Image (cartoon, grey):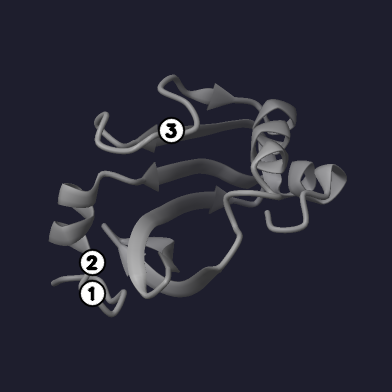
Amino acid sequence: ARSGDLAVLEGLFAADAVSLADSNGAVRAASRTPVVGATQLAKVVRAYASTFWIGVDVQWATLNGLPAAVLRRDGVVFAAITSAASADGIFQLLWHMNPAKLAGAVTSDGAARS
């Protein structure tokens, strides 16, 4: 995601992959509608490679029973991305960006709340 390599990104996703961003209007999210398909999703992720990931520290966690990347910039958690995958690749990305929901799901050090 950081490099924006379209071929590599597309290879990670299942053909029918779906990505949803939830900010509930509290922060600007990439898309208010689902992004569907490996090619389309790879293009969206690539479009943000040079800006979104600047200064981001990633911590791996489990949220809602799914593997997650907790993203922090300047020590502050600003997003968590959960994923679901099969043998065909990643078929779902959920971008959690609503500060109120993040506060309920992730501690200030990036750990999942129980």
Q: Position of residue 4 (x, y in %)?
A: 77, 49
Residue type of the residue flagged with mark 1: Ser
Q: Earlier in the sequence, mark 2 or mark 3?
A: 3
Q: Position of residue 16 (x, y in %)?
A: 62, 28
The spot of residue 64 in percent (x, y) is 26, 57
Going by the picture, which residue comes out furthest to the bottom?
109
Q: Is residue 111 above or below residue 2?
A: below
Q: Please, is residue 109 above or below residue 7 in the view?
A: below
- Mark 3 Cα shell of 10 Å, populated few (<14), some (14-19), many (≥20): some
Residue nearest the observer in this picture, 32 or 84: 32
Q: Which residue is mark 3?
A: 20
**The N terminus appears in which quarter of the rendering?**
bottom right
Going by the numbered disc 2, the residue's amino acid type is Val
Q: Residue at x 38, y 72 (%)?
A: 61
Of labels 3 and 1, the one closer to you: 1
Image quadrant holding the C terminus, namely bottom left
- Horizontal side of 43 relative to 104 (left or right) equals right
Q: Which residue is mark 2?
A: 106
Which residue is under mark 1? 108
Front-lying residue, 4 or 112: 4
Q: What's the mark number on residue 61?
A: none
- The quarter of the picture where residue 48 lies is top right
In the shown orientation, is residue 17 left or right of residue 22?
A: right
Q: In the rendered image of this protein, does residue 89 appear above or below residue 32?
A: below
Measuring 31% from the left and 74% from the top, which residue is drawn there?
110
